[in-house]
Amino acid sequence: LMPKRFRERHDHHVSQFGKGSESQKILEERTEMVALRKNGEEFPVEISISKQHTGHERIYTSIIREVTDRVRAEKKLQFQAYHDSLTGLPNRQFFEDKIRDVLAQKKRFPEMLLAVLFIDLDQFKYINDSMGHSVGDALLEQVAKRLLQSLRDGDVVARWGGDEFVVLLNMLPHEDDAIGAAERIIQVMSQPFMLNDQLFLCSASIGIAFYRGKQEEAKDLSYNELLRNADIAMYRAKELGRARYVVFGQSMYDRVQTRMVLEKDLRQALKDENLELYYQPILELKTAQVAGFEALLRWEHPTRGWISPGVFIPLAEESELIIEIDQWVLRHASLQLQTWHKQYPHAKTMTMSINLSAKHFALPHYISDLIAIVEEVGVDPDFLKLEITEGTLLKQSDSVTTLLKQMKDRNLHLCLDDFGTGYSSLSYLGKFPIDILKIDRSFVCQLKTGSEQIEVVRAIITLAHSLGMKVVAEGVETLFQMAELEKLSCEYIQGFFVSAPVRKSIAANFVQQPIWQGEFRL
Ligand code: C2E
Ligand code: CA
Ligand code: CA
Protein backbone atom coordinates (compact mmCIF):
# COMPACT_ATOMS: atom_id res chain seq x y z
CA LEU A 1 0.00 0.00 0.00
CA MET A 2 1.24 3.47 -0.87
CA PRO A 3 -0.10 6.89 -0.04
CA LYS A 4 -2.19 7.88 -2.99
CA ARG A 5 -0.01 10.72 -4.15
CA PHE A 6 3.06 8.56 -4.69
CA ARG A 7 1.29 6.29 -7.14
CA GLU A 8 4.10 3.76 -7.11
CA ARG A 9 3.67 0.06 -7.32
CA HIS A 10 4.28 -1.64 -4.01
CA ASP A 11 3.21 -4.89 -2.65
CA HIS A 12 2.86 -4.34 1.06
CA HIS A 13 -0.17 -5.66 2.79
CA VAL A 14 -0.25 -4.30 6.25
CA SER A 15 -2.97 -5.08 8.65
CA GLN A 16 -1.30 -4.74 12.00
CA PHE A 17 1.41 -2.43 13.21
CA GLY A 18 3.98 -2.95 15.88
CA LYS A 19 3.40 -2.03 19.46
CA GLY A 20 3.68 1.58 20.57
CA SER A 21 3.57 3.21 23.95
CA GLU A 22 2.33 6.80 23.56
CA SER A 23 -1.46 7.00 23.57
CA GLN A 24 -4.04 5.67 25.88
CA LYS A 25 -6.99 6.71 23.82
CA ILE A 26 -8.54 5.27 20.77
CA LEU A 27 -6.94 6.84 17.76
CA GLU A 28 -8.47 6.85 14.43
CA GLU A 29 -6.92 7.95 11.18
CA ARG A 30 -7.97 7.54 7.61
CA THR A 31 -5.89 7.72 4.47
CA GLU A 32 -6.44 6.82 0.90
CA MET A 33 -3.96 4.59 -0.80
CA VAL A 34 -3.55 2.64 -3.94
CA ALA A 35 -3.49 -1.10 -3.58
CA LEU A 36 -2.65 -3.81 -6.05
CA ARG A 37 -4.66 -6.84 -6.90
CA LYS A 38 -2.90 -10.17 -7.45
CA ASN A 39 -3.14 -9.61 -11.18
CA GLY A 40 -1.26 -6.35 -10.81
CA GLU A 41 -4.28 -4.09 -11.27
CA GLU A 42 -4.39 -0.97 -9.11
CA PHE A 43 -7.40 -0.05 -7.05
CA PRO A 44 -8.12 2.67 -4.49
CA VAL A 45 -8.51 1.76 -0.85
CA GLU A 46 -9.21 3.66 2.27
CA ILE A 47 -7.30 2.59 5.32
CA SER A 48 -8.15 3.47 8.87
CA ILE A 49 -5.97 2.66 11.82
CA SER A 50 -7.06 2.63 15.42
CA LYS A 51 -5.06 2.11 18.52
CA GLN A 52 -6.55 0.69 21.68
CA HIS A 53 -5.01 0.70 25.10
CA THR A 54 -6.24 -1.95 27.48
CA GLY A 55 -4.15 -2.40 30.62
CA HIS A 56 -0.60 -3.10 29.45
CA GLU A 57 -1.68 -4.13 26.03
CA ARG A 58 -1.90 -1.93 23.02
CA ILE A 59 -3.86 -3.21 20.08
CA TYR A 60 -3.64 -1.65 16.66
CA THR A 61 -6.44 -2.40 14.28
CA SER A 62 -6.48 -1.48 10.68
CA ILE A 63 -9.45 -1.64 8.36
CA ILE A 64 -8.88 -1.56 4.62
CA ARG A 65 -11.81 -0.85 2.38
CA GLU A 66 -11.98 -0.85 -1.36
CA VAL A 67 -13.42 2.51 -2.51
CA THR A 68 -13.40 2.12 -6.29
CA ASP A 69 -17.04 3.20 -6.69
CA ARG A 70 -16.71 6.24 -4.51
CA VAL A 71 -13.53 7.38 -6.21
CA ARG A 72 -15.12 6.90 -9.61
CA ALA A 73 -18.12 9.02 -8.59
CA GLU A 74 -15.83 11.70 -7.18
CA LYS A 75 -13.82 11.82 -10.37
CA LYS A 76 -16.97 12.15 -12.39
CA LEU A 77 -18.16 15.02 -10.25
CA GLN A 78 -14.80 16.68 -10.50
CA PHE A 79 -14.81 16.29 -14.28
CA GLN A 80 -18.27 17.77 -14.46
CA ALA A 81 -17.27 20.71 -12.31
CA TYR A 82 -14.41 21.53 -14.66
CA HIS A 83 -15.82 20.62 -18.05
CA ASP A 84 -18.57 21.72 -20.34
CA SER A 85 -21.09 18.94 -20.77
CA LEU A 86 -21.94 19.77 -24.40
CA THR A 87 -18.49 19.99 -25.98
CA GLY A 88 -16.46 18.10 -23.38
CA LEU A 89 -13.99 20.99 -23.32
CA PRO A 90 -12.73 22.43 -20.06
CA ASN A 91 -15.07 25.11 -18.77
CA ARG A 92 -14.63 28.65 -17.54
CA GLN A 93 -13.87 27.53 -13.98
CA PHE A 94 -11.09 25.27 -15.19
CA PHE A 95 -9.66 27.96 -17.42
CA GLU A 96 -9.64 30.56 -14.68
CA ASP A 97 -7.95 28.17 -12.24
CA LYS A 98 -5.42 27.24 -14.90
CA ILE A 99 -4.50 30.76 -15.86
CA ARG A 100 -4.26 31.77 -12.22
CA ASP A 101 -1.85 28.88 -11.61
CA VAL A 102 0.23 29.85 -14.61
CA LEU A 103 0.47 33.46 -13.56
CA ALA A 104 1.40 32.40 -10.04
CA GLN A 105 4.63 31.00 -11.50
CA LYS A 106 5.64 34.30 -13.04
CA LYS A 107 8.30 34.97 -10.41
CA ARG A 108 10.11 31.83 -11.52
CA PHE A 109 9.89 32.67 -15.22
CA PRO A 110 10.44 36.39 -15.58
CA GLU A 111 10.61 36.18 -19.37
CA MET A 112 7.34 34.29 -19.57
CA LEU A 113 5.25 35.05 -22.68
CA LEU A 114 1.72 33.84 -22.81
CA ALA A 115 -1.34 34.72 -24.83
CA VAL A 116 -5.05 34.51 -24.25
CA LEU A 117 -7.33 34.27 -27.26
CA PHE A 118 -10.95 35.23 -26.81
CA ILE A 119 -13.07 33.73 -29.56
CA ASP A 120 -16.66 34.61 -30.42
CA LEU A 121 -18.65 33.00 -33.22
CA ASP A 122 -20.00 35.53 -35.67
CA GLN A 123 -23.14 33.81 -36.96
CA PHE A 124 -24.02 31.57 -34.03
CA LYS A 125 -26.95 33.62 -32.80
CA TYR A 126 -28.49 33.74 -36.25
CA ILE A 127 -28.10 29.98 -36.83
CA ASN A 128 -29.31 29.12 -33.33
CA ASP A 129 -32.35 31.39 -33.56
CA SER A 130 -33.39 30.37 -37.04
CA MET A 131 -32.53 26.64 -36.97
CA GLY A 132 -33.26 25.75 -33.36
CA HIS A 133 -31.16 24.84 -30.37
CA SER A 134 -30.29 21.30 -31.40
CA VAL A 135 -28.63 22.65 -34.54
CA GLY A 136 -26.93 25.32 -32.43
CA ASP A 137 -25.62 22.62 -30.08
CA ALA A 138 -24.33 20.55 -32.98
CA LEU A 139 -22.53 23.61 -34.32
CA LEU A 140 -20.84 24.23 -30.95
CA GLU A 141 -19.66 20.62 -30.82
CA GLN A 142 -18.15 20.89 -34.29
CA VAL A 143 -16.52 24.18 -33.44
CA ALA A 144 -14.96 22.60 -30.34
CA LYS A 145 -13.48 19.81 -32.48
CA ARG A 146 -12.06 22.27 -34.99
CA LEU A 147 -10.52 24.37 -32.25
CA LEU A 148 -8.83 21.33 -30.76
CA GLN A 149 -7.51 20.36 -34.18
CA SER A 150 -6.04 23.76 -34.85
CA LEU A 151 -4.14 23.97 -31.55
CA ARG A 152 -1.08 22.19 -30.28
CA ASP A 153 -0.52 19.89 -27.31
CA GLY A 154 -0.20 21.94 -24.19
CA ASP A 155 -2.48 24.72 -25.41
CA VAL A 156 -5.65 24.96 -23.37
CA VAL A 157 -8.97 25.60 -25.05
CA ALA A 158 -12.11 26.06 -22.99
CA ARG A 159 -15.71 26.96 -23.54
CA TRP A 160 -16.26 30.28 -21.86
CA GLY A 161 -20.03 30.17 -22.20
CA GLY A 162 -22.60 30.52 -24.97
CA ASP A 163 -20.74 30.81 -28.25
CA GLU A 164 -17.54 32.07 -26.67
CA PHE A 165 -14.33 30.09 -26.37
CA VAL A 166 -10.99 30.93 -24.81
CA VAL A 167 -7.50 29.65 -25.52
CA LEU A 168 -4.40 29.83 -23.37
CA LEU A 169 -1.08 29.62 -25.17
CA ASN A 170 1.54 29.15 -22.49
CA MET A 171 5.31 29.64 -22.66
CA LEU A 172 5.31 31.00 -26.17
CA PRO A 173 8.67 31.34 -27.90
CA HIS A 174 7.41 34.34 -29.84
CA GLU A 175 4.33 36.56 -30.22
CA ASP A 176 4.03 35.42 -33.84
CA ASP A 177 3.13 31.96 -32.59
CA ALA A 178 -0.08 33.33 -31.11
CA ILE A 179 -0.85 35.17 -34.34
CA GLY A 180 -0.27 31.88 -36.18
CA ALA A 181 -2.72 30.10 -33.88
CA ALA A 182 -5.36 32.81 -34.46
CA GLU A 183 -4.85 32.54 -38.22
CA ARG A 184 -5.23 28.75 -38.08
CA ILE A 185 -8.46 29.11 -36.12
CA ILE A 186 -9.87 31.64 -38.59
CA GLN A 187 -8.83 29.30 -41.40
CA VAL A 188 -10.54 26.19 -39.96
CA MET A 189 -13.64 28.22 -39.17
CA SER A 190 -13.91 29.48 -42.74
CA GLN A 191 -14.92 26.00 -43.91
CA PRO A 192 -18.70 25.48 -43.97
CA PHE A 193 -20.37 23.39 -41.27
CA MET A 194 -22.71 20.56 -42.16
CA LEU A 195 -25.74 20.77 -39.90
CA ASN A 196 -29.03 18.99 -40.52
CA ASP A 197 -27.92 18.20 -44.10
CA GLN A 198 -27.41 21.88 -44.78
CA LEU A 199 -24.22 23.86 -45.10
CA PHE A 200 -23.71 26.87 -42.85
CA LEU A 201 -20.95 29.41 -42.62
CA CYS A 202 -19.91 30.51 -39.15
CA SER A 203 -16.77 32.60 -38.86
CA ALA A 204 -14.96 33.60 -35.69
CA SER A 205 -13.75 36.92 -34.32
CA ILE A 206 -10.69 36.68 -32.10
CA GLY A 207 -9.12 39.03 -29.57
CA ILE A 208 -5.55 38.37 -28.48
CA ALA A 209 -3.99 39.65 -25.26
CA PHE A 210 -0.37 38.97 -24.38
CA TYR A 211 1.19 38.58 -20.99
CA ARG A 212 4.74 39.69 -21.63
CA GLY A 213 6.71 38.70 -18.53
CA LYS A 214 8.32 41.64 -16.79
CA GLN A 215 6.44 44.27 -18.74
CA GLU A 216 3.07 43.09 -17.48
CA GLU A 217 4.31 42.24 -14.03
CA ALA A 218 5.26 45.86 -13.54
CA LYS A 219 1.59 46.67 -14.07
CA ASP A 220 0.62 43.79 -11.81
CA LEU A 221 -1.80 42.57 -14.45
CA SER A 222 -4.24 40.05 -13.01
CA TYR A 223 -5.66 37.09 -14.89
CA ASN A 224 -8.99 38.89 -14.89
CA GLU A 225 -7.51 41.90 -16.62
CA LEU A 226 -5.75 39.68 -19.12
CA LEU A 227 -9.05 38.05 -20.05
CA ARG A 228 -10.82 41.39 -20.16
CA ASN A 229 -8.17 42.73 -22.55
CA ALA A 230 -8.64 39.76 -24.87
CA ASP A 231 -12.41 40.38 -24.72
CA ILE A 232 -11.97 44.06 -25.61
CA ALA A 233 -9.78 43.12 -28.58
CA MET A 234 -12.43 40.60 -29.69
CA TYR A 235 -15.05 43.38 -29.72
CA ARG A 236 -12.71 45.48 -31.81
CA ALA A 237 -12.40 42.57 -34.27
CA LYS A 238 -16.22 42.52 -34.51
CA GLU A 239 -16.33 46.25 -35.10
CA LEU A 240 -13.78 45.95 -37.85
CA GLY A 241 -16.01 43.53 -39.73
CA ARG A 242 -15.66 40.11 -38.02
CA ALA A 243 -13.85 36.96 -39.19
CA ARG A 244 -10.52 38.41 -38.07
CA TYR A 245 -8.20 38.76 -35.08
CA VAL A 246 -7.10 41.90 -33.27
CA VAL A 247 -4.24 42.21 -30.78
CA PHE A 248 -5.13 44.18 -27.68
CA GLY A 249 -3.57 47.63 -27.25
CA GLN A 250 -3.84 50.13 -24.41
CA SER A 251 -5.65 52.71 -26.57
CA MET A 252 -8.47 50.21 -27.03
CA TYR A 253 -8.90 50.04 -23.30
CA ASP A 254 -8.91 53.82 -22.97
CA ARG A 255 -11.61 54.06 -25.63
CA VAL A 256 -13.72 51.47 -23.88
CA GLN A 257 -13.27 53.38 -20.61
CA THR A 258 -14.39 56.70 -22.11
CA ARG A 259 -17.28 54.99 -23.79
CA MET A 260 -18.35 53.28 -20.59
CA VAL A 261 -18.30 56.52 -18.63
CA LEU A 262 -20.27 58.25 -21.38
CA GLU A 263 -22.78 55.43 -21.48
CA LYS A 264 -23.24 55.61 -17.73
CA ASP A 265 -23.81 59.38 -17.97
CA LEU A 266 -26.28 58.90 -20.80
CA ARG A 267 -28.20 56.36 -18.76
CA GLN A 268 -28.34 58.86 -15.92
CA ALA A 269 -29.40 61.68 -18.25
CA LEU A 270 -32.26 59.54 -19.51
CA LYS A 271 -33.30 58.75 -15.94
CA ASP A 272 -33.14 62.38 -14.85
CA GLU A 273 -34.85 63.52 -18.07
CA ASN A 274 -31.82 65.62 -18.93
CA LEU A 275 -32.28 64.98 -22.61
CA GLU A 276 -34.07 67.50 -24.76
CA LEU A 277 -35.93 67.21 -28.02
CA TYR A 278 -35.35 69.74 -30.76
CA TYR A 279 -37.76 70.03 -33.66
CA GLN A 280 -36.88 70.73 -37.26
CA PRO A 281 -39.73 71.96 -39.48
CA ILE A 282 -40.57 70.10 -42.67
CA LEU A 283 -41.94 72.39 -45.35
CA GLU A 284 -44.50 71.39 -47.95
CA LEU A 285 -43.38 73.04 -51.20
CA LYS A 286 -46.82 73.20 -52.84
CA THR A 287 -48.40 75.17 -49.99
CA ALA A 288 -45.29 76.81 -48.50
CA GLN A 289 -46.56 75.62 -45.13
CA VAL A 290 -44.85 73.79 -42.34
CA ALA A 291 -46.40 70.34 -42.56
CA GLY A 292 -44.71 68.90 -39.51
CA PHE A 293 -41.46 68.36 -37.64
CA GLU A 294 -38.70 65.85 -37.17
CA ALA A 295 -37.85 65.29 -33.51
CA LEU A 296 -34.07 65.28 -32.97
CA LEU A 297 -32.49 64.45 -29.66
CA ARG A 298 -30.05 66.72 -27.85
CA TRP A 299 -27.89 66.01 -24.83
CA GLU A 300 -26.09 68.57 -22.77
CA HIS A 301 -23.49 66.71 -20.76
CA PRO A 302 -22.83 68.26 -17.32
CA THR A 303 -19.08 68.64 -17.97
CA ARG A 304 -18.53 68.02 -21.68
CA GLY A 305 -21.23 70.33 -22.97
CA TRP A 306 -23.36 69.47 -25.98
CA ILE A 307 -22.77 66.03 -27.39
CA SER A 308 -24.00 65.37 -30.90
CA PRO A 309 -26.54 62.58 -31.47
CA GLY A 310 -24.11 61.41 -34.15
CA VAL A 311 -21.88 60.45 -31.20
CA PHE A 312 -24.25 59.33 -28.48
CA ILE A 313 -26.84 57.50 -30.59
CA PRO A 314 -24.28 54.97 -31.92
CA LEU A 315 -23.03 54.66 -28.34
CA ALA A 316 -26.53 53.92 -27.08
CA GLU A 317 -26.92 51.41 -29.92
CA GLU A 318 -23.99 49.41 -28.54
CA SER A 319 -26.21 48.45 -25.65
CA GLU A 320 -29.94 48.17 -25.40
CA LEU A 321 -30.07 51.67 -23.95
CA ILE A 322 -31.22 52.87 -27.36
CA ILE A 323 -34.48 50.99 -26.87
CA GLU A 324 -35.32 53.12 -23.84
CA ILE A 325 -34.18 56.25 -25.65
CA ASP A 326 -36.39 55.53 -28.65
CA GLN A 327 -39.31 54.96 -26.30
CA TRP A 328 -38.58 58.19 -24.45
CA VAL A 329 -38.41 60.16 -27.72
CA LEU A 330 -41.61 58.61 -29.06
CA ARG A 331 -43.48 59.38 -25.85
CA HIS A 332 -42.30 62.97 -25.54
CA ALA A 333 -42.58 63.88 -29.21
CA SER A 334 -46.10 62.40 -29.39
CA LEU A 335 -47.16 64.31 -26.27
CA GLN A 336 -45.74 67.49 -27.76
CA LEU A 337 -47.60 66.98 -30.99
CA GLN A 338 -50.81 66.34 -29.07
CA THR A 339 -50.31 69.57 -27.10
CA TRP A 340 -49.80 71.57 -30.30
CA HIS A 341 -52.85 69.99 -31.93
CA LYS A 342 -54.95 71.05 -28.94
CA GLN A 343 -53.44 74.51 -28.61
CA TYR A 344 -53.65 75.44 -32.28
CA PRO A 345 -56.71 73.95 -34.00
CA HIS A 346 -55.49 75.16 -37.40
CA ALA A 347 -52.40 73.00 -36.94
CA LYS A 348 -54.20 69.77 -36.24
CA THR A 349 -52.86 68.06 -39.35
CA MET A 350 -49.23 68.67 -38.45
CA THR A 351 -47.09 65.57 -38.28
CA MET A 352 -44.20 64.41 -36.13
CA SER A 353 -41.33 62.33 -37.52
CA ILE A 354 -39.43 60.13 -35.10
CA ASN A 355 -36.20 58.23 -35.70
CA LEU A 356 -36.07 54.54 -34.87
CA SER A 357 -32.85 52.68 -34.29
CA ALA A 358 -31.93 50.09 -36.89
CA LYS A 359 -29.96 47.99 -34.48
CA HIS A 360 -32.78 46.54 -32.41
CA PHE A 361 -35.65 46.79 -34.84
CA ALA A 362 -36.21 43.07 -35.10
CA LEU A 363 -35.89 42.38 -31.37
CA PRO A 364 -39.02 40.89 -29.85
CA HIS A 365 -41.17 43.64 -28.28
CA TYR A 366 -39.27 46.56 -29.82
CA ILE A 367 -42.13 47.43 -32.18
CA SER A 368 -44.99 46.21 -30.00
CA ASP A 369 -43.68 48.31 -27.07
CA LEU A 370 -43.58 51.37 -29.34
CA ILE A 371 -47.12 50.68 -30.52
CA ALA A 372 -48.20 50.38 -26.87
CA ILE A 373 -46.72 53.83 -26.16
CA VAL A 374 -48.63 55.38 -29.07
CA GLU A 375 -51.84 53.86 -27.70
CA GLU A 376 -51.08 54.93 -24.15
CA VAL A 377 -50.37 58.53 -25.15
CA GLY A 378 -53.52 58.46 -27.25
CA VAL A 379 -52.02 60.43 -30.14
CA ASP A 380 -53.62 59.79 -33.54
CA PRO A 381 -51.09 57.49 -35.29
CA ASP A 382 -52.06 59.06 -38.60
CA PHE A 383 -49.87 62.03 -37.69
CA LEU A 384 -46.82 60.03 -36.66
CA LYS A 385 -44.09 59.20 -39.13
CA LEU A 386 -41.50 56.69 -38.08
CA GLU A 387 -38.14 56.98 -39.78
CA ILE A 388 -36.10 53.89 -40.44
CA THR A 389 -32.95 53.43 -42.50
CA GLU A 390 -32.15 51.19 -45.42
CA GLY A 391 -29.95 49.05 -43.20
CA THR A 392 -32.99 48.11 -41.14
CA LEU A 393 -34.79 46.81 -44.21
CA LEU A 394 -31.93 44.76 -45.53
CA LYS A 395 -30.79 43.13 -42.33
CA GLN A 396 -33.51 40.57 -41.74
CA SER A 397 -35.94 41.33 -44.49
CA ASP A 398 -38.53 38.65 -43.67
CA SER A 399 -39.12 39.54 -40.06
CA VAL A 400 -38.85 43.25 -40.88
CA THR A 401 -41.59 43.00 -43.51
CA THR A 402 -43.89 41.48 -40.88
CA LEU A 403 -43.03 44.20 -38.38
CA LEU A 404 -43.57 46.99 -40.90
CA LYS A 405 -46.94 45.52 -41.80
CA GLN A 406 -47.82 45.43 -38.11
CA MET A 407 -47.04 49.15 -37.91
CA LYS A 408 -49.05 49.92 -41.03
CA ASP A 409 -52.01 48.04 -39.57
CA ARG A 410 -51.93 50.56 -36.71
CA ASN A 411 -52.06 53.44 -39.21
CA LEU A 412 -48.49 54.50 -38.47
CA HIS A 413 -46.62 56.03 -41.41
CA LEU A 414 -43.17 54.89 -42.41
CA CYS A 415 -40.32 56.96 -43.83
CA LEU A 416 -37.17 55.59 -45.33
CA ASP A 417 -34.42 57.83 -43.91
CA ASP A 418 -31.03 58.73 -45.44
CA PHE A 419 -32.02 57.19 -48.76
CA GLY A 420 -29.06 56.68 -51.04
CA THR A 421 -26.42 56.21 -48.35
CA GLY A 422 -26.98 52.52 -47.80
CA TYR A 423 -27.26 49.97 -50.52
CA SER A 424 -28.95 52.30 -52.96
CA SER A 425 -30.72 49.37 -54.46
CA LEU A 426 -33.86 50.81 -55.94
CA SER A 427 -35.37 47.48 -56.93
CA TYR A 428 -36.14 46.18 -53.45
CA LEU A 429 -37.99 49.31 -52.39
CA GLY A 430 -41.37 48.20 -53.70
CA LYS A 431 -41.34 45.20 -51.35
CA PHE A 432 -41.84 47.34 -48.25
CA PRO A 433 -44.87 49.39 -47.20
CA ILE A 434 -43.02 52.73 -47.15
CA ASP A 435 -44.97 56.01 -47.42
CA ILE A 436 -42.18 58.54 -47.65
CA LEU A 437 -38.65 58.53 -48.98
CA LYS A 438 -36.11 60.94 -47.50
CA ILE A 439 -33.33 61.75 -49.96
CA ASP A 440 -30.11 62.01 -48.05
CA ARG A 441 -28.34 65.31 -47.55
CA SER A 442 -25.31 64.09 -49.50
CA PHE A 443 -27.34 64.21 -52.75
CA VAL A 444 -29.08 67.45 -51.96
CA CYS A 445 -25.91 69.34 -51.05
CA GLN A 446 -24.51 68.57 -54.51
CA LEU A 447 -27.44 70.21 -56.24
CA LYS A 448 -25.66 73.14 -57.84
CA THR A 449 -25.83 74.71 -61.29
CA GLY A 450 -24.53 72.31 -63.91
CA SER A 451 -24.20 69.35 -61.52
CA GLU A 452 -25.02 65.83 -62.75
CA GLN A 453 -26.53 65.07 -59.36
CA ILE A 454 -29.74 66.61 -60.55
CA GLU A 455 -30.29 63.55 -62.74
CA VAL A 456 -29.74 61.19 -59.81
CA VAL A 457 -32.18 63.14 -57.66
CA ARG A 458 -34.68 63.20 -60.52
CA ALA A 459 -34.40 59.41 -60.90
CA ILE A 460 -34.96 58.85 -57.17
CA ILE A 461 -37.99 61.12 -57.09
CA THR A 462 -39.51 59.52 -60.20
CA LEU A 463 -39.00 56.06 -58.76
CA ALA A 464 -40.52 57.02 -55.40
CA HIS A 465 -43.56 58.50 -57.13
CA SER A 466 -44.01 55.42 -59.30
CA LEU A 467 -44.12 53.37 -56.08
CA GLY A 468 -46.70 55.71 -54.59
CA MET A 469 -44.31 57.34 -52.12
CA LYS A 470 -43.87 61.00 -51.33
CA VAL A 471 -40.41 62.57 -51.10
CA VAL A 472 -38.67 64.70 -48.47
CA ALA A 473 -35.34 66.26 -49.41
CA GLU A 474 -33.04 66.52 -46.40
CA GLY A 475 -30.36 69.11 -45.75
CA VAL A 476 -31.68 71.82 -48.06
CA GLU A 477 -29.45 74.80 -47.43
CA THR A 478 -29.91 77.12 -50.42
CA LEU A 479 -32.63 78.77 -52.40
CA PHE A 480 -31.26 77.14 -55.55
CA GLN A 481 -31.63 73.65 -54.05
CA MET A 482 -35.18 74.39 -52.99
CA ALA A 483 -36.13 75.70 -56.42
CA GLU A 484 -34.60 72.68 -58.18
CA LEU A 485 -36.43 70.30 -55.90
CA GLU A 486 -39.69 72.06 -56.55
CA LYS A 487 -39.11 71.71 -60.31
CA LEU A 488 -38.50 67.98 -59.78
CA SER A 489 -41.89 67.70 -58.03
CA CYS A 490 -40.36 66.89 -54.66
CA GLU A 491 -43.15 67.29 -52.08
CA TYR A 492 -41.28 68.35 -48.95
CA ILE A 493 -37.99 69.91 -47.92
CA GLN A 494 -36.15 69.98 -44.61
CA GLY A 495 -32.93 71.81 -43.87
CA PHE A 496 -31.15 74.87 -42.57
CA PHE A 497 -32.64 76.93 -45.39
CA VAL A 498 -36.01 76.64 -43.69
CA SER A 499 -34.74 76.26 -40.15
CA ALA A 500 -32.22 74.34 -38.11
CA PRO A 501 -33.67 72.03 -35.45
CA VAL A 502 -34.94 74.30 -32.65
CA ARG A 503 -36.19 74.14 -29.08
CA LYS A 504 -39.90 73.51 -28.61
CA SER A 505 -40.59 77.14 -27.62
CA ILE A 506 -39.23 78.32 -30.98
CA ALA A 507 -40.82 75.46 -32.90
CA ALA A 508 -44.14 76.63 -31.44
CA ASN A 509 -43.81 79.76 -33.59
CA PHE A 510 -43.95 77.58 -36.69
CA VAL A 511 -47.03 75.86 -35.34
CA GLN A 512 -48.69 79.16 -34.61
CA GLN A 513 -47.70 80.65 -37.95
CA PRO A 514 -47.20 77.74 -40.37
CA ILE A 515 -46.96 79.79 -43.56
CA TRP A 516 -43.29 80.06 -44.25
CA GLN A 517 -42.10 83.66 -44.09
CA GLY A 518 -38.82 83.14 -45.93
CA GLU A 519 -37.92 83.81 -49.52
CA PHE A 520 -39.86 81.33 -51.57
CA ARG A 521 -40.16 81.88 -55.30
CA LEU A 522 -37.19 82.68 -57.47
P1 C2E B 1 -30.97 62.19 -39.35
O1 C2E B 1 -32.16 61.39 -38.95
O2 C2E B 1 -30.55 62.09 -40.78
O3 C2E B 1 -31.26 63.68 -38.93
C1 C2E B 1 -30.98 64.78 -39.73
C2 C2E B 1 -29.71 65.41 -39.30
O4 C2E B 1 -29.34 66.41 -40.23
C3 C2E B 1 -29.84 66.13 -37.96
O5 C2E B 1 -28.61 65.99 -37.30
C4 C2E B 1 -30.05 67.58 -38.39
O6 C2E B 1 -29.67 68.51 -37.41
C5 C2E B 1 -29.15 67.65 -39.59
N1 C2E B 1 -29.56 68.67 -40.52
C6 C2E B 1 -30.81 69.12 -40.78
N2 C2E B 1 -30.81 70.04 -41.75
C7 C2E B 1 -29.54 70.19 -42.15
C8 C2E B 1 -28.89 71.00 -43.15
O7 C2E B 1 -29.50 71.77 -43.87
N3 C2E B 1 -27.55 70.88 -43.29
C9 C2E B 1 -26.83 70.03 -42.51
N4 C2E B 1 -25.52 69.97 -42.70
N5 C2E B 1 -27.41 69.24 -41.55
C10 C2E B 1 -28.75 69.33 -41.39
P2 C2E B 1 -28.55 65.63 -35.78
O8 C2E B 1 -29.68 66.28 -35.06
O9 C2E B 1 -27.15 65.91 -35.36
O10 C2E B 1 -28.83 64.08 -35.78
C11 C2E B 1 -27.92 63.20 -36.33
C12 C2E B 1 -28.48 61.82 -36.41
O11 C2E B 1 -28.68 61.24 -35.11
C13 C2E B 1 -29.86 61.77 -37.07
O12 C2E B 1 -29.71 61.80 -38.44
C14 C2E B 1 -30.40 60.47 -36.55
O13 C2E B 1 -29.92 59.40 -37.31
C15 C2E B 1 -29.80 60.40 -35.17
N6 C2E B 1 -30.82 60.83 -34.20
C16 C2E B 1 -31.14 62.09 -33.80
N7 C2E B 1 -32.15 62.06 -32.91
C17 C2E B 1 -32.49 60.76 -32.76
C18 C2E B 1 -33.47 60.07 -31.98
O14 C2E B 1 -34.28 60.66 -31.26
N8 C2E B 1 -33.52 58.69 -32.07
C19 C2E B 1 -32.68 58.01 -32.90
N9 C2E B 1 -32.77 56.66 -32.96
N10 C2E B 1 -31.75 58.62 -33.65
C20 C2E B 1 -31.66 59.98 -33.59
CA1 CA C 1 -34.15 61.14 -39.55
CA1 CA D 1 -31.77 61.59 -42.46
Image (tube, grey):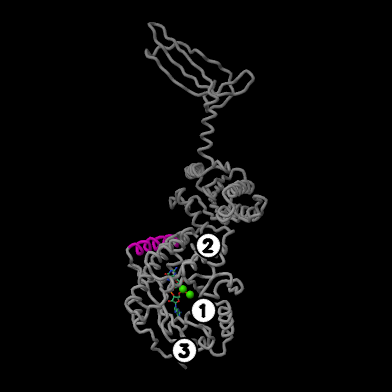
Q: CA distance from mark 1 to mark 2?
A: 35 Å
Q: Earlier in the sequence, mark 3 or mark 2?
A: 2
Give the x, y percent position of residue 412. 46, 70
Q: Earlier in the sequence, mark 1 or mark 2?
A: 2
Residue beneath disc 3: 479
**Label 1 beta carbon within 8 A of ligand 2:** no
Please name the amino acid that badge 3 sits on: Leu
**Most frequent secondary structure within the magenta stretch:** helix
Residue 307 at least partly seen: no
Q: Secondary structure at mark 2?
A: helix
Residue 440 at least partly seen: yes
Please name the amino acid that badge 1 sits on: Lys
In percent of the image, x 53 and y 36: which residue is there?
79
Q: Secondary structure at mark 3?
A: helix
Q: Which one is in front, 346 or 215? A: 346
Q: Which one is in front, 77 or 245? A: 77
Residue beneath disc 2: 239
Please name the amino acid that badge 2 sits on: Glu
Residue beneath disc 1: 470
Q: Which residues are magenta?
A: 255-271
